[in-house]
Structures are given as structure tokens and as C-alpha cells.
Amino acid sequence: MEEWVGVKWHHYITQKAMPSFPDAALRLESIQKPLSIYFRAMGGDKALKISYTGPQKIHSHRNWVQKIAGAGNRTECAHFQRDYLYLPEKIDCFSNSENNSDLYYWLAAMASHNQSPHHEQLLPHNLYLTQKSIHRWTGLKASYLQLINKHINHRPNIQSLPKPLQPAESMLRQCLLELNPNNALTPELLAQLNPVPLWLYASPLSVQQATQKDEQKDPDLKAEASQNENEKNKRYQAESIEDAEKDGLLAFRLESLFTWSEFINLDRSEEDGDDEDAMRVADDLDQLSVSRGETASKLKLDLDLPAPEYDDIIKLSGILLPEWHHKKQQLVKDHCSLQLMQLKDTPAATWSAELKKTAQQLKHQFEVLKPQRQWLNQQAEGQEPDLTSYLDFMVSKQQGNSQSDPKLYRQCQQTHRDLSCLVLTDLSLSTDAYISNDLKVIDVIKDSLYLMSECLHAANERFAIAGFTSRKRSHVRYYDIKGFDQAYNDETRNAIHAIEPSYYTRMGAAIRYGCQQLIKQKTKQKLMLILTDGKPNDLDHYEGKHGLEDTKQAIKEARQTGITPFCVSIDQQAYEYLPYLFGSQSYFHIKKATDLPKKLPQLYFQLTG
Amino acid sequence: MKNIQTINPENSNQNTGQDTTFYQAVGNEVELFDTAWNNQLPVLLKGPTGCGKTRFVQHMAEKLGRKLYTVACHEDLTASDLIGRHLIGDGKTYWQDGPLTKAVREGAICYLDEVVEARKDSIVAIHPLTDDRRILPIERTGELLQAPDGFMLVVSYNPGYQNLLKGMKPSTRQRFVSMRFDYPNAELEAKIIQQESGCSEDWAQKLAHLAQQIRNLKDHDLEEPVSTRLLIYTATLINKGMSPLEAAEAAIAEALSDDESVVEALMQVTKAYLG
């Protein structure tokens, strides 16, 4: 009951304190894609990503309702920070959602000049950017005027402000309308006024750095810390800890405070892994206190191999395969032993809605590959005469050399795509590495396999999926995720979802076994699509030259049997060795690993379409 | 050979005595083309769609006073579509010259548009014409044509979208003097838009600047950016009384992408410029 009342009260009082229009609220997520494209089109830095921040602390004047509500002291401001342009997570300051959307586009347009305002020159710099935008994009003028007028109506009543702030507020309003900076409006006064949602604000880090410049002792630590923060997507406000709260009304018992702060002398720059709880707590914090001082030392752990009791089912073992010995320049017979594996657990998988949507879009594209009816010329029999062939026939007859078996008809036939494709993916432990905040390489591979299979299935293509991993030459493991003759259904989808990284990458043996499977296919064209994240390697000297040479040999053998191998790699160094293994035309290097799921089907389409 | 005669000579893209087709030079392309023609060198034009490759060839043919034979290449284009074939009439067979043969006989310019679309084996037919021999052997009739000095072979393609299986054989590509075309700068483009659509200078300027902005999206969000041709379409629609935003939506945003969010973004950019 107490909580329920609390929640109701909170809603009531915050609504009273800050005029907002939740019904018209627009979330950044809903327009993020067009907004990013817009930002780039307007000239914004293409390397920047648009994201949202946690609210920042502001020091504007608050009325008593706001103080009671504990509102008005944190707000989301648009600003640049390193690789990101941060915009508010949601905008609800106008009563109609079109205005809220216009505000997002306005902020993106302001930001597309790629200038981050200095915190002491906030007013002149923003007015300059506004003028520049309006001048350059004349269509934005009407939009600006509409937004700014509405915003001014929503600003607190001048009379309700404390006496010293009243002239400042009216000066600000005048500036916003006339776009002429007023020197009497100092940064200190400005900071006490409500923020202007149409403005870009200084990067909080640069503000902090300006105030902390001389406190910085250890440049190495700073670099490391900033690198860490760089990888964060959602940012929280980091500020020095001296900032003491003096303004505000404490109307609660201390233990039921809505917000809390902490300071523990921990080296945050070294802490890895975002556990969810920490994220939740961080959301509630006013600020994260980050220490730059000297703290505890680092711990380094080596990852161990997974324990055997969790192992998958061995379907068939003792498949012997040769390996290329490059020093002797010969194939060593029965050097590797391959086991055909089956996944132990394949729990029902759920794929993200976004992935499903992408699958839907791509499927549409792949429909084109579906066997279609096509007119074939020069047939012995058919529905229509082939005029060109007939002409040629008559001409040669008149000239005295007639054919005995003329092919003079056109026929409409179902054409079959004469192609089988084996997707062979690397499941070594290196795919367990993180490539972004919450994605591992293996997740990207799973998503790719899922999208790929959905597309190939939609196009009626003949395909198989397999994964491989190895631990020395005696344990090369080959997971048959989907066979050529196996139907594609939920079982296959679950199997794709259940794949786990383990052990190493003995690529040669896996390619040889994959070839044996492909050769059995009766189609004319056979494509082997190899997905990997690195070089071949294994414990028993299968690294460096040996591994590369064996793989190269396996690929050569594949080509000789009429298979087309093609490699897709997300390894940053891929260009150094892939041309050597596959030749300059038969590999593709995906620079951004997270693009793999979308790129892979497109690549297939391009290769075979 | 006597019973074979050329029938029904077709006129393609004939200059009917009007003023030469408008073409706004961007760099040294006119000079280069002139020199290549004077020295019997074949030319390859590459550039994005709608940047003026075809218009340039048309303009040059008129300028040089040569007839122009244009062939739009496609997958089913055979060598006999280029060289010619026999036809039957009145109980006799007639030989019909293809556009390439006609151009060789008349010392005209033969232009193969989007040459990568044609099957590689049909394109091999042009090989003997593109080296110093400058000959065209016609297998079916046993003729061997020597190209006169006025004959010139021009091919074009768009390097933007290429299938890994398509693309030009290096042995073909290395037979041409190559010229790269791109969209002109805003000032020149505005001039072109105004000239072609008859719109006001102000609109031409606005559209040209809008195009510059949209071209920022090349490779990242758009496979191919907005072409000068589309800008001319837009200007024409505006000039004929359509509202600028509607015109831009139809001739720019929707023409460039099927993706709704891209269209939405393009419309917002358009609004910022034209609204």
C-alpha cells in the first residue's frame, strides 16, 4: 500500500512540477534509423552513432513544487561525446508528437555541423549554430520558430522566478527569438535558467576535464579509463565527488530517499562485465563517482577448456582424414580422426523480433531465386516456334547446307537452380569473444546462420549447415546442424541456436570432410561457404605455416573436385592471409562483425544470383 | 554474295539538323574524346547512373558530325545481334547488318551502353575492332570489314553495382581509353537542371544543393545516390506546378529507396531544403 501511494504521488507531483506530455512522447528508438540517415545526409560525421544518455544534473532554479517532487534537477540534453551523439531517450516536451519528432530532427540538424559547444560559450555558440542551420536549410526556419515559440510558452512564468533571474530569463527568450547573443547573459546566469531543449550542450566530460585539468596525475590510467568508457553505449554522468547538494527540500525520511549515491574506492576503469544489477543501480544514481586515484591491482585469468562431462553426443567416430605436410610436400594419410557430433541439448529457441523482421525483408529478396518459368530457345519441341532459329535454319537450307535435326521451338519450362551450398562455420573458442557490449562472435554467427537458412529455405535452395572445432588431430569435431536432405524446421532453428563454442580450429580436416558431403550432391554447382573469425590453429603445431598450408591444400583439393569454396571472415587481419588461402576473388572480409547477419545472405545472393 | 543486300537501313539517334544536344562539360572529357576519335582509339566511359554518359556520347557524335548507333546491352544479346543476321524474303535470303557492322561500314560511332550486362562471349566479337587491326570479320558471309578512320567504338558501364559473376573481362577492359564520369558540382549541376527542365534558377540551385547533401549517404545508406537525371525530373515536375515536396517525394525519395526509414529521412532532408 505504502508503495502504491508512493508511486501515485510520484506521478502526480512530477507531472505538476515539469510540464510534459506523455501521450505525445516520442522515443528515440522509434525514429533512430531515419534520424541517423538524416544526420549523415545533412553532413554529420558518418563515424558517429546516435544514442541516448542517462539524464544529467542541472543547476537551474526550481520552484517549490519541483523541489518537493525531486524533479527538475536532472534532464537529458543533446551533446556529443566521443563516438556518439547523445540525444534524449524520449522527447515529450510538446503536446503533439509531430513537434516532438521535429525537435529530434532539429537537434540532428544542429549536430550535423559537427561542432560541440564550449560550456562557457553555450549561448553564442548555439545561436550561431541555429543561425547557420536556418540559413543553410531554409525549410527549417518555420520549424524552429514554431518549436521555440511553443517552448517559450512552456518555460516557467517569469514572475514566478526569483528576482535576480527575472531579467536573465527575459534576455534568454529574446535571444532565442532574435538569435542575437546578449553578453549580459553570463554562463553563470544561464546555468540557473531552465535548459533549452533545442540546444546542443557541452560534453559533460569536457566540462569535467576543464575543471579537473590540474588534478590529473596518471595519464596512462586516464587513457585506459577513457577507452573503457568508450565502449559503453549508454552513458551515465560522471562527476567529481565534491559536488555537494545544498539546494532542495528533504521531505522524506532519509531511508526512503528516491536516489542514492555511493563512493567506493574501486578502480572502475578496470572492472569488466556489466552485470544487470549494476546497470539498474546505475540508472538510479544521480552520478557515478569514478576515482582516478591509485587502487587495487588487476587479476588475469586464462580461460580453461570446457569440461568433458558437458560434452555433446558422438554420432560416429573414427573417420580418418589426411593432412598436408608442407615440409615434405605430401599428404600424410589418415593423420586426423574426425567425429561426427550431435548437439546434446537443443532447447526451443526464441529469435529477436528484429531478426525476424530482417529475415522477412531478406526472404522477399530471395524469392527471386525461386525456380521460375522461363522461355528456353532452340528446343526440339515446344509451345511456340523460335523465330530466330527458324530463320537461321531456312537460311542454311537455302544456301544448301541443311541440318537434319533442327531445333526450332521455344518452350516454357521450370528452370532449376543447379546448386548445393554447404555453410561451414568455425565453432572454436575464439568465437566466445565479445565484439560489442552484449554480443559475442558466436551470437553473430548464430544470427547469421538463422537469417541465411531462412532466406535459403524461402528460395528453395539446396543447402546444409555444419560447424567444426578440434582438439588436436585425434579430435576433429564436425557438427551436422542441417543435412542436405533434412527439412528446415524448428528443430533446425533450435539446433542453430544451441551451438556452443569449444576448442580450436583445424580447418583443413573440416573442409575435407565437408567436401566429401558436397561431392555426393548431384547438382552441377557446389558452393562451400566457410565462416570464420581467424586463422586455422590447433594445439599440436597446427598453427602458423603448417595450418595455413594444410588449409590451402584442402581448398585446392576442393577446387579440383569442382567445388567452389568461398570464405567470409570477420578477422581484422583477414586480408593478410585469406588471399593466400582462397585467392583474391574467393573471400570476403566483413569489417564490422555485427554486420555479418545481414551481409551474409546478401553476399550469397550476389554470388549466386 | 550478289543475292545478299542490305535492306531497311535503320536510323538511330540521327541528327536532324537541330542544334547540338546540350552537354555541360565538367572536365577535360570533350578534349579527350576528340583526341581519341582523331587517333582511332576506342573509349570506355564509367560512372554512376544518370550522370550524363549517354548524353555525352550523343553530344560528341553530333559535334564530330558522325552518326551514332546505340546498343543497350542485355543478357540475351548475342554476337549476331551486334554483327547481323540473314533474313528471308521473296524466296531469297538477305543479309541484315547489325548496328556494329553498320557503324563500321558508315564510319559512325557505335555505343554499347551498360556493356557488362551483355554475355562475355558476345562481347568478344568487338575485340578485333578494338586493337590496331580495326577489322570486323563477319563469319556468316565471309566478309572482312576494315573500319574507316571515322569509326569509333564507345562502351559504358556503371561500376557501382556489380555482380561477382558479372564484370568486365580484363582482356576486354584493357582495350579502351577509360574515362570516369561523376556527378557535377552544385554550380554546374544547377545550370544543367535549369537548362534541361526550364525551371527557375532558384529551384535549380536548391535542388543541386539538396543533391549534394543526399550524396553524403552513398555507400552508407544508399546504394546509389540521386542522379542528375532524377533532379531534372523533379525540377520538371515542380516547373509544371506540382508542389516541391510532392515532386521530390516521387522523383527523389521514393525513386532512391524502398526502405521506409530511408524514404522518411530523405523527405526530412528535402523538407529542410525546400520546405
Image (tube, coloured by chain):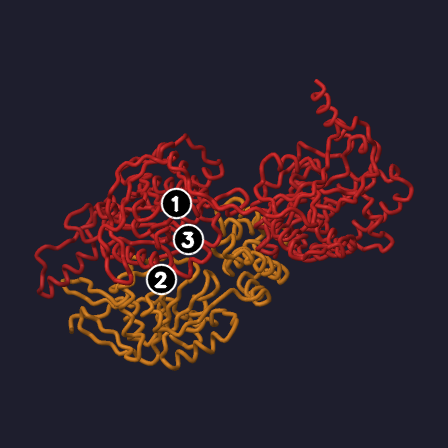
Q: Are marks 1 and 2 in contact (CB under 8 Å)?
A: no
Could you say which is closer to the camera, residue A474 or residue B241? A474
Q: CA distance from mark 1 to mark 2?
A: 25 Å
Query: In the image, what residue occupies the spot 25% across and 45% down?
Result: A517
Label 1 residue SS? loop
Q: Residues within 10 Å of mark 3 (few under 14, many from 20)?
A: some
Q: Please name the amino acid that badge 1 sits on.
A: Tyr
The chain displayed red equals: A
| Disc number lying in front (1 or 2) | 1
Q: Does B152 appear above or below A541? A: below
At which x and y percent is residue A187? Answer: 82, 51
**Relative to residue A525, is residue A3 drawn left or right?**
right
Q: Please name the amino acid that badge 2 sits on.
A: Tyr
Which comes before the other along the chain, label 3 or label 1? 1
Q: Does A490 appear above or below B133? A: above
State the mark number for residue A337. none
Q: Which residue is mark 3?
A: A534
